[in-house]
Amino acid sequence: MIPQSPSKSSLPNTLEHRPEHSSQSPLSVHAMTVAYHKKPVLWDVDYDATPNKLIAIVGPNGAGKSTFIKSCLGLVPKAAGLVEFWGMPYRRARSRIGYVPQRESVDWDFPVSALDVVAMGRYRHIGWCRPVSRKHKQVALECLDLVGMKPFASRQISQLSGGQQQRVFLARALAQQADLYFMDEPFAGVDAATERAIIEVLRRLKGEGKTVIVVHHDLQSVPEYFDEVILLNMRVVAAGPVREVFTKENLHKTYGGRLTLLSEAAEAVARNEIGV
Amino acid sequence: MTPGTGPSSIQDVTDEWPAIAEIIETITLRAGHNTNMVIAGTTLLGLAAGLIGVFALLRNRSLMTDALSHATLPGITLAFLILGAKSLPVLLLGATITGVLGVLCIQLLLRHTRLREDASIGIVLSVFFGAGIVGLSYIQVNAPSGSGGLNHFIYGQAATMQPRDVVLMGAIALAAMIATIFLLKEFTIVCFNDAFARVDGWPVGLIDLLMMALVVVVTVAGLQAVGLILVVSLLIIPPVAARFWTDRLPRLVIIAALIGACSGYTGSVVSALFPRKPAGAVIVLTAGVFFAISMFFAPRRGVIAITIRRQKLRMKIAGDHLLEFAHDLGETMISRDQYLGFAKLHAWSKTYTAMVGFSLARDGMIERVNQGGITLTDAGVRRGNRVSRNHALWEQYLVSYADIAPSHVDWSVDLVEHVLSEDLVLELESALRKRGVVIPEHTIVGGR
Amino acid sequence: MFFDIGLDLFPLLAAVFAAVSCALLGNFLVLRRLSLMGDAISHSVLPGLVIAFLITSTRSPIAMFAGAAIAGVATVVLVEFVKRFGRVESGAAMGVVFSILFALGVLLIEQAAARHVDLDADCVLHGQLETLVWYSAPDSFGGLFTLQTLQQTPRQVKTLAITLILAIGFVTLLFKELRLAAFDSALATTLGFNATFLHYLLMIFVATATVASFEAVGSILVIAMLICPAAVARLFTDRLGSQIICSVIVALICSIGGYFSATILPSAFGIDAVNAAGAMAMMGGIVLAIAVFVSPSHGVISRVIRRRRLSGRVALDDLLAAIFRATEKGQLQPTRTELQIGFAHANLHRTIQRANHLQLVEPIGTQQVRLTESGMQAASEVVRRHRLWEHYLVEKVGLAPDHVHETAELLEHLPPRPPQGPESDPHGKVIPKGFS
């Protein structure tokens, strides 16, 4: 492999390995490496999502959980690897993908109401240059209702509590009417009512045959809320059904140290700026 | 700089007031063609700048526009040097080119060096402007005559506005309005949450570019009227001022455009009526007045409104404490000594104590009796009950749920008992019951 | 003539003093991400100056400094006020405050002009260095060292000299406190150095430097010198001490270089001199542009060189490993064509030449090559590292065996040593013994 031009070297290999990924899978990630400022954060990740499941991504801080989602969605450039959705590249599958970013990623003092934010989920359906019609507003309102936020529709978003803001984001994702959802830490710092609302929404989505991938930080609730789990720490330690994969041993592998050498190597890659 | 030889204190300067008739004529656009041109031009400029400034503000690009406007100067001088003549379109084209170049330099510095945004903006601003100053001084001493007007791009000279400039302003204002009307949705989603917009399939780079292009056009058009140092304030101040009045983006855009237009209008009218009032400065100061008024007097976000709200809450909490105190004593009457003792315990000043009493009385919680003592009304007793109960509930909750409480609560413990909603109280009760905690007795006398 | 004492000495001194004092202070502005506060203050000092001038009707330095210091602190306080109570983002808050104050200044200057007071707004921006001509200057440098020189030094130069001394005193005496406050202001406050107080003190110094400079060199040079030297120094060093020294050197280069390129260079071409302050600001930009390319630690060129050197080493390692693998398969003298397969680097022949030059590889005929003794050692070390890494990645990191080759290929060239492992790698190949 040539460090200078990773694309050249990884291409033949990816083609060679393609058949092992199914085109039925809503998300298949092959040999994905991601680096921030040349420092690898995800190293050679392989993953295939099972359709119609609630999937949690767990791992320690800095394990690359959010990065995993962001690079799947093309928000963070990949150093190497291939991501496909139902066997298609991201560009063609985009209309079937929904996204709930981290709550801290936006300015909540922005001059829009809760309903306006949810209506953003409809923009793709509305298209360029057209205003949000009554029909789409109605859909947005229904989505707000699903998360129990209908009474707050006209509130400016800074006047909502943290949990309520999270529910607005969730409603926006619902309004996207996608088949595959990525949610970045939706449970972080929310109240009990919001947690219940999110879980209800997740189950409803599953009931509608959709797949949801959630970055999660609370290990205790994983078996209760999710069907499958990805244990992530710079690479996929284990992935699969919760009862098979969510074992003490795997968790120890994910959270226990033992990777000092790998992260040292990542530092060296960053220092030498050779790129991965 | 030489010391003044004229009158020696600031009060001595008095501008003669123009006649009322003249004022009315100017205000109603009857003061002659030239004046009207200037007024129309600056009003349109203010409108366009306020409109497009909203998106620059929401995208956190306010100071980027400052660098942009400073970076136009070398372009103006270069265009003049190359063409050797003062043709406005050519000068503005030069301004646009170096202005955009400056913005690109900022992006390059941010991407390829360890310098932060503030330093990158400052570098581009000062270096480009320095280059422009060098160019200006070169032109002044070396170039043929006819170059005197270039200085006006720094501080602006609205009075030189020609009909075609007004047409240009009008076209720009129209373009900004059309873009805002048709692309409001796209601009909003990119400004609010660009990552989401990208995932949703919008070409974020293209939309960003369009917003920036409008900013560039407005900046360049404003150079002549208000000058490159102050044009940026037309982009920043109206949106910031408008933000105090509304929480809705469409209204924000309209209000900002109105404030911009009013500032442009007022500035040029004042400058036409009084001698030695440069239009650019007056326009900006007018916008500044709008800003000050908005910041202090806006109904919800204004400083005064916020202060009053805060005071009210403090009063309510202090009153609650007093009612709770009465409840815990089991009394409906508090003597003067008890009252003052309570005030002393909470380190209330005399005025504050009086204010608390007053606000409680106004809310019908207490009645005053003789010798400075107070009696609680029924409402006051009920309120005291509720606060006391909430307090107890909260304490119980913290005791029995201390391990999970922090993730469920984001208020400070002292204040929480006063702001618990009915829902939360019910949730607290059921949570505590589940744990088998004995809940303080429900002593509320009817009502809730 | 190259340097005319009467024409050039005082302007140059004024420029140097102003540039160095600004550069000293600018280090802390850049570190605290407050660069634009310097910009804001140098704009909003204008009304302070004019008001001080209008009230006292003199240009006494004390009144001027008082006006400027008050305006400077007022700017900081107002920005903070707008930010906190108006819930406005800090860039916009600065923009609002300084542009309103600057507009006020421009308006007041016009009022002053009505009273035949010559306060030129242009001069505030780009200064009037050329007015600092010394008519009774001595002919030679020897004649400078008299009391008369001191007496005839223009007020502006004296003011700037005092500012420079103050700035040096401020930075050296409070170096440790300023560093702490720039790095972690909360910690500084808990340790008993009031970070807020230091912050305001710094701002007062910036305002002072601005007002001391404005008459001679103008506020544009102030902004440039507050930011550019410190920014250049940031690109060269990671230590605050050396950063400050570096920024002073840059300020000297900018002021002296800028001055000469504005006055002497044009006259060589028979053109009149151009504005020196602007030229100095431009010089700052040029130095920065050069620094972006040539800085040894953070520059673009050194990065490219480092990368090329590394890629040369990687190519060499890969060549040795390729021959070693061929040798393992029993082919002791592989041909160039065989080696070309799987050799991902640009030029196989040049790599072989280099390896030959280093006596690691020797050619046999025109087509075949083989490893020398030292080449054998180096090659087996590379392969050993590669296979140990593969072992580690499979066993400890848990990657699939068919995925580890590429990662190991990358890691084998890097400093961290793989942990010891068994005799064979995950693909069943023997891990060569280390020679060292």
Image: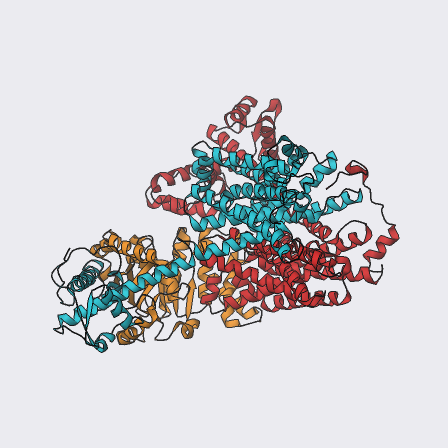
Chain colours: A orange, B red, C cyan
Looking at the picture, does residue A25 appear above or below residue B342? below
Looking at the picture, does residue B200 appear above or below residue C239? below
Q: Position of residue C369 (x, y in %)?
A: 19, 72
Q: Position of residue C134 (x, y in %)?
A: 67, 40
Q: Position of residue B329 (x, y in %)?
A: 47, 28
Q: Position of residue B65 (x, y in %)?
A: 59, 57
Q: Quadrant of residue A18?
A: bottom left
Q: Quadrant of residue C161?
A: top right
Judge whether residue B247 can be spotted in this image: no
Judge whether residue C52 can be spotted in this image: yes
B133 and A90: which one is in front?
Answer: B133
C54 and B81: which one is in front?
Answer: B81
Tally the marks: 0
Looking at the picture, does residue A233 appear above or below residue C371? above
- Quadrant in the picture for the C terminus of chain C: bottom left
Residue occupying the point 69% across, 34% down? C60
Q: Is residue B107 left or right of residue C364?
A: right
Q: Is residue A227 left or right of residue C108?
A: left
Q: Is residue C182 left or right of residue B269?
A: left
Looking at the picture, does residue C178 appear above or below residue A6? above
Residue occupying the point 26% across, 63% down? A239
A183 and C7: which one is in front?
Answer: C7
A196 and B198: which one is in front?
Answer: B198
Q: Is residue C20 left or right of residue B434?
A: right
